[in-house]
Amino acid sequence: MNNFNFDPKQFDTKQIESMMFGPARAYAALSVDFTEKLVNAQLDASKAYADNGLAQLRSLMNVKDAEGLRSYMEGQQQAAQDLAERLKKDAEKVVSLQQEFVQQGQKLTEENVKQAQQTTAKTAK
């Protein structure tokens, strides 16, 4: 026979919550927030690039003579500069999001280590 009597009313989940589930949920929330921001940034960038490409195609369709071609080619230079600037800003935005994620992850880890040390010290007493 089993002499082990488990009483769930006496089982303290606070320690498990504070050392395992709480930090896991906090990190999951941080990851989901980061993913949402990154996906939104990518969608915004994709839309801007698609809009730019379509605008260039529409401009090309309006070329009817040499003057129109010259004007289109000049517009292409400006479009290339605008695209390069947009790419730079988008890359900076992604780097900023990644740095923010790392910083928040480090802060979360430090808080969890501190809490685990406090819990361990209390348990040892």
Image (cartoon, rainbow, N blue to C red):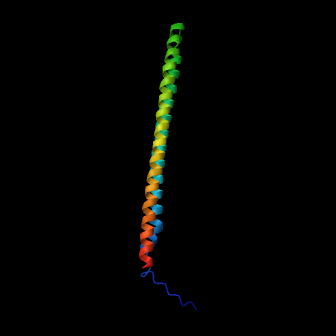
Q: Closer to the camera, 19 or 73? A: 19
Q: Closer to the camera, 109 or 21? A: 109
Residue in view at x 50 percent, y 28 percent: 84
Q: How many marks?
A: 0
Q: Closer to the camera, 44 or 97? A: 97
Q: Residue furthest top?
A: 66
Residue 66 falls left or right of residue 110:
right
Q: Closer to the camera, 20 or 47? A: 20
Q: Quadrant of the N terminus?
A: bottom right
- Residue 101: x and y in percent read 46, 50
Q: Residue furthest right?
A: 1
Q: Is residue 121 above or below residue 76?
A: below
- Residue 114: x and y in percent read 43, 65
Residue in view at x 51 percent, y 22 percent: 56
Q: Is residue 50 above or below residue 67?
A: below
Q: Is residue 65 above or below residue 27?
A: above
- Residue 8: x and y in percent read 45, 80
Q: Quadrant of the C terminus?
A: bottom left
- Residue 44: x and y in percent read 46, 37
Residue in view at x 46 percent, y 34 percent: 89
